Amino acid sequence: MKTSNVLIVALVLLGILMTACAGAAPTATSVPAPTAVPAAKPTTAPAPTTAPVVKSNVTLTYMASQDWIMDAEQALGKKFEEKTGIHVDYQIIPSDQYFNVLQTKLNAGEATDIFGGQSGVSDLKLQLNVEKNAVDLSSEPWAKQEDPLVAAQATVNGKLYGLTYWDTLGTSWVVNYNKTLFQKYNLSEPKTYAEFKALCQKLLDNGIQPLYEPVSDGWHQVLWFPELGPRYEQVTPGLVDQLNANKAKFADNPTMLANLTQLKEIYDLGFMGKNALSDAYADRTKIMASGKVAMAVMGTSFPQELEKDYPNVKADTWGFFVMPLADNQLLNLNPAGPTKFIYAGSKHSAEAKQYFNFLTQPENLQYFIDNNPRAMTLPFPGVKSKFTPALQAFMDAHKDKRGTVYQTAVNYVNPQWMDIGKDIVAMFSGTLTPQGALKSIDQRRADMAKTAKDPAWAQ
């Protein structure tokens, strides 16, 4: 997830004196994939080198949001301890509490040795203040190996502050659908919102819940909105630059209004089921394996995750299509993702660097991919991907129809992710209109920009 957010913006921004976010965000059309679709065989790449291993009796504390630290990484952590004597204490915080806890610790100067955060230049400045709170990793052996587009999202003023150990390509958020149910009811992948609405209605009429939407976690329902940034940019070329220059507003954009209006209609028509507000992300594989729900917005690695949990449900029985709100047909890509940072106040930064160097050794990168059902690849050369034929075909079909999501391309969006989630819940309940939700996003962007002393909002 994603995805990541700020609950208390004032605390995040307090004391940060800066101008507009350095490094223009990429435009949302014709952006290449963060990591190219790997060839069948791994490419040859030089292995990162590490300093001689020195055994240490040290415990590294590492705090991250729920679902950010996979079992495969914890297994690597044990191997790291066997090799170095350095123990890694993984501290997992529920996603709806994580950034509140992190900000409290950063502001108090009591952060863990390693902390997780969402990459993206805006987040690094506004949410994490990495120039104060994180260690410069630019000279680490793995730094030049990481995919440049991914590394750029963990870089501020030319310095790399984070390791994005995440499948930024394989976790593109798209509609995963049960091909067996689609075949049974003679359904095809929709090309417009009208087609999507019609197939949802046909499923519902036949006793099948069309969509699984776990609203209770607070973040998942937000995916339907900023992930469609490529479509907004397609309809209004240059919109990213206009928004970042404070020359355009979300509330004035008809495509964004259409998106939220249609999202509310999907909810109102019952396509998300009767329990969407209480449904949980943690139940995703159980629900989708039941065959009672046809579709869910998940990462492209979801079918493998599903097969791991329920071996009788085969990954190749699932297909993909892009979220079709506002008639979108562009693939949403995000070179940002959950990222590891070393706290500037840590007494064990050298050991933390050892841990990062260990994780990025070629054999450990491959181990992580091979033993993590949610990772199809990693943004480093020389790894062998796990793309299914269906996923490969999907990626090939969209190789010239893709763009960057708006939480990465547009300043002051990702830091308010959870607040947008609350707006969408209010929209579902009828206490806020889609237009009102867009105005709320604009107001929070303005508040953050002014606190950050962004010159585009100076007047």
Image (spheres, rainbow, N blue to C red):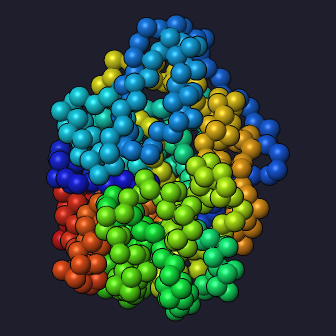
Relative to 319, 347 lies left or right: left
In this rendered view, identify the residue nearer to me: 72 or 268.
Answer: 268
In this rendered view, identify the residue nearer to me: 413 or 241.
Answer: 413
Q: Residue reaching furthest right?
A: 41
Look at the image and tell me whether residue 253 can be seen.
Answer: no
Q: Is residue 351 above or below residue 396?
A: above
**Looking at the image, which residue is at 43% across and 72% down?**
224
**Looking at the image, which residue is at 29% across and 73% down?**
424
Q: Position of residue 152 (x, y in %)?
A: 51, 49
Q: Position of residue 293 (x, y in %)?
A: 52, 71
Q: Is residue 321 above or below residue 418?
A: below
Q: Quadrant of residue 402?
A: bottom right
Look at the image and tell me whether residue 73 can be seen.
Answer: yes
**Looking at the image, which residue is at 17% across and 47% down?**
11
Q: Position of residue 155 (x, y in %)?
A: 46, 45
For the C terminus, the image quarter is bottom left
**Looking at the image, which residue is at 29% across and 52% down?**
96
Q: Is residue 55 above or below residue 48?
A: above
